Amino acid sequence: MQVYLDNNATTMVDPLVVEVMLPFFSEIYGNPNSLHKIGTASHPAISKAIDQVYTALNAADADDIVFTSCATESNNWVLQSVFIDHVLNSDKNHIVTTEVEHPSILSTCKFLEEQGVKVTYLPVNGQGVVEAETVKAFITDKTALVSVMWASNETGMINPIAEIGEICKEKGVLFHSDAVQAVGKIPVDLQSVHVDFVSMSAHKFHGPKGVGALYIKNSQALSPLMHGGEHMGGRRSGTLNVPGIVGMGKAIELATTNIEETSAKIRVKRDRLEDAILELSDTFVVGDRDNRTPNTILISIRGVEGEGMLWDLNNGQIGASTGSACASEDLEANTVMLAIGADNELAHTGIRLSLSRFTTDSEVDYTITHFKDAVARLRAISSSFAIQKPTEGGEVQECELHHH
């Protein structure tokens, strides 16, 4: 059996999404910016996709949603353009973000620091959450932007976006949220919270790779990142990725229709998997379930290196992760684990399991069995894991845990 539990890295494209995309490769293939009928033939489908995204996010008519290539582009666009529009030639020079953002935020912030911007990287609490009061404490009259992810790609923990939004509104500071891990997993209602910019990527909710979007509240000014033409109202140049846009519209509609019901079903499977793994000694999961995306588990197993565990799971045809796929080639301690105060050894043991609506009960059963066996195998050869076992005389001696 092959089991895919790395849905926070990417997801399978829903066959219904593939179906609506297909005509736009070889049948309705004109450039939508052309004036002839072959070009304009795709306009109704693009309009429909835009409507599907607005509806899914409950965006207001006054808001703008611009299609991009992915959330990495959307994130770069916001940070770099806020720098151009609100820092250069202005007295503001400060950005507030967190230690646990996606690399596309952290690397862009590092780049902006080289341009002279001051960046504050906020810590998370023991739950892996950024507290609204912490954000408030670090906003100054020099702050141009606050950027806090809606939900963590690694832990699934959900940040208090509504509270942070109110603080930013009150202080007159722009607020951006990378909502890649929230859209399609939990309700995202952009009229119930105050956020200026929201990034998202279709491939995180069973849409195609290579297409994402940026939500812009009240269609406010934001210098383009991509120059060259009048596409997307002059906001983002480049011929529209029509199949991708059509696919993203369908995918976001499928992911957000009956989202509470779908989430509840995924949560039941996730909790069953989590409970089974927690039956093992010296294991712990990061963050409270109730404030976590319904599909995510970041679990630490003392004495088991994350990479060793991945290798063992991979041999059993189970795809998992030690953290963000965008950073998983760097075999360093998991930054999120360190940020929540785990010791260095535990920070090397984090395994992320992320389910989807396509995950089955039999896949969960298979994973539980293989996972438990893998832990026993790896602990048997682990130098760092030994359990305390009382001897007959009541003394405690260390003994290696062997495979049962």
Image (cartoon, helix red, strand yellow):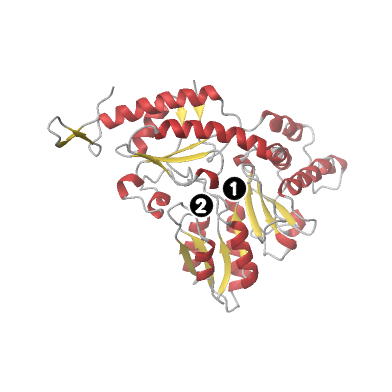
- For badge 1, the amino acid type reads Val
Q: Mark 2, residues whose alpha carbon is within 10 Å: few (<14), some, or many (≥20)?
A: many
Quick one: 143 or 292, which is closer to the camera? 292
Q: How far apart are marks 2 and 1 (CA)?
A: 10 Å
On the image, the x and y values in percent for residue 380 come to: 25, 29
Work out whether residue 8 can be spotted: yes
Quadrant of res 215:
bottom right
Seen in the image, is 42 located left or right of residue 247? right
Instruction: Please name the residue that numbered disc 2 is placed on.
Output: 102
Q: Are marks 2 and 1 in contact (CB under 8 Å)?
A: yes
Quadrant (top left, top right, bottom left, bottom right) of the C terminus: top left
Secondary structure of residue under mark 1: loop
Q: Which residue is drawn at 60% across and 29% down?
A: 358
Q: Where is residue 57 in the image (x, y as percent from the top left)?
A: 71, 49
The residue identified by callout 1 is 180
User: Tag 2: residue type?
Assistant: His
Left or right of residue 297, residue 16 in this image: right
Secondary structure of residue under mark 2: loop
Left or right relative to 398: residue 13: right
Query: What residue is shown at x 48% (from left), y 39% (from top)?
Result: 297
Locate residue 281: give its quadrant.
top left
Q: Farthest top residue?
A: 1
Position above or below: 195 against 401: below
Which residue appears at 71% of the width and 58% of the height? 235
The foreground one among 235 and 185 is 185
